Image (cartoon, rainbow, N blue to C red):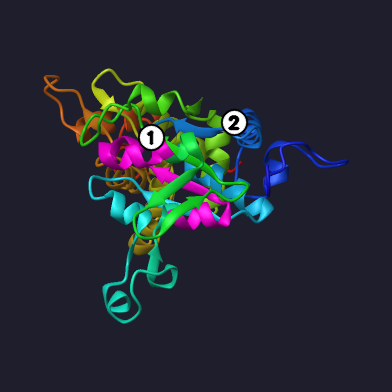
């Protein structure tokens, strides 16, 4: 496939090394995605938010200089917005010609032979999905008054979706799945998530950062939570805690600083199961106490077994 290298050359390293600082782990997913694209397939990436779907694809496109066209999937993505339109003012002067047509993201990707990335594809209206199905099947697009646009070599569609989100989404039809390869992306390991937080947050003691990651990972397994937090929650908890400690002129390891940062960073990211009778704040307090210990007595600000420098 033009622009995307699935086979490594002499001395080229697989996995994260081949993609610089952008991707942590994901060796298997990288290989599967590269193989699918190189084989000429269109691909659906399925997984919860924060599992690096967009980051992974951007890294692949950036590595090889491939055009990357991003489309946010939502109910407002009509066929016209995806394909493009004729500029009314230019049409009055020049008529319906190629130069008066304003390319939409699909046409842009078709012309350039790039990667069209449709995020949250299960939020896209059915009539818009039908346009994508035709392009995936035929490798071309018929635009009234413009003609037939044939996909340039290298064009691929990669769609992403969160299969666990049922609000504002629609079931993806068998016609779509019949035309794509599917790669499932789950959450990464504790160590990999801790590395992601370290790369995207201010420098903090490693042992404390690991506890924050542990706290976030526990939200995904708690019986009272329908939805847990992604690694983005851990990143925000660390960032907020660093800022809060500075504002309060306190230590980062102060129990209350971490607790307040966890409330700010996680309470909006988790969803409580209906009927459990608890609030998100109550569950986060329970988990925070389990990871960092009970709130200390006055004068002992850190509480629990204070994590030291790592």
Quadrant of the rendered image containing residue 164: top left
Is any part of residue 38 visible from this angle? yes
Q: Give the mark count.
A: 2
Task: Estimate the x, y position of residue 241 in percent, counting from the top left.
Answer: 39, 51
| Badge 1 density bin: few <14, some 14–19, many ≥20, Cα 10 Å | many
Q: Depth check: 253 or 199 in front?
A: 199
**Quadrant (top left, top right, bottom left, bottom right) of the N terminus:** top right
The answer to whether 13 is drawn above or below residue 278 in the figure is below
Q: CA distance from mark 2 to mark 1?
A: 15 Å
> Along the horizontal axis of the image, is 306 left or right of 11?
left
Is any part of residue 242 visible from this angle? no
- The residue that appears at 36% across and 42% down in the rendered structure is 131
- Residue 91 is a magenta residue: no
Q: Report helix, strand or loop for mark 2.
A: helix
Badge number at residue 29: 2
- The residue that appears at 35% across and 35% down in the rendered structure is 229
> Along the horizontal axis of the image, is 132 left or right of 9?
left
Q: What residue span does the magenta drawing correspond to?
A: 107-134
**Quadrant (top left, top right, bottom left, bottom right) of the C terminus:** top right
Which residue is denoted by mark 1 in the rendering? 161
Dot 2 or dot 1: first in sequence order is 2
Task: Estimate the x, y position of residue 208 in percent, counting from the top left.
Answer: 49, 40
The answer to whether 181 is drawn above or below residue 82 in the figure is above
The answer to whether 157 is drawn above or below residue 41 in the figure is below
């Amino acid at each position: 496939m033009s622009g995307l290298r699935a086979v490594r050359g002499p001395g080229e390293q697989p996995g994260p090394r081949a993609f610089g600082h952008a991707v942590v782990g994901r060796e298997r997913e990288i290989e599967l995605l590269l193989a699918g694209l190189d084989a000429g397939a269109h691909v659906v990436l399925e997984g919860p938010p924060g599992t690096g779907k967009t980051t992974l694809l951007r890294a692949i496109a950036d590595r090889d200089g491939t055009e990357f066209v991003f489309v946010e999937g939502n109910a407002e993505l009509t066929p016209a917005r995806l394909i493009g339109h004729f500029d009314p003012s230019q049409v009055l002067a020049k008529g319906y010609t190629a130069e008066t047509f304003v390319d939409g993201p699909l046409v842009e990707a078709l012309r350039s032979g790039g990667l069209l990335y449709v995020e949250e594809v299960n939020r896209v209206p059915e009539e818009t999905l039908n346009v994508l199905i035709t392009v995936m099947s035929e490798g071309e697009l018929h635009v009234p008054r413009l003609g037939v646009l044939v996909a340039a070599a290298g064009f691929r569609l990669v769609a992403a979706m969160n299969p666990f989100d049922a609000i504002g989404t629609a079931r993806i039809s068998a016609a779509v799945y019949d035309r794509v390869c599917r790669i499932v992306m789950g959450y990464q390991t504790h160590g990999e998530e801790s590395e992601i937080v370290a790369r995207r947050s201010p420098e903090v003691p490693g042992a404390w950062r690991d506890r924050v990651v542990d706290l976030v990972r526990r939200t995904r397994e708690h019986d009272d939570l329908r939805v847990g937090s992604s690694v983005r929650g851990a990143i925000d908890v660390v960032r907020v805690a660093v800022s809060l400690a500075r504002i309060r002129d306190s230590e980062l390891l102060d129990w209350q600083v971490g607790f307040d940062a966890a409330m700010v960073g996680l309470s909006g990211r988790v969803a409580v199961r209906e009927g459990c009778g608890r609030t998100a704040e109550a569950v986060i307090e329970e988990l925070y106490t389990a990871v960092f210990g009970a709130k200390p007595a006055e004068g002992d600000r850190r509480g629990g077994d204070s994590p030291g420098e790592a």
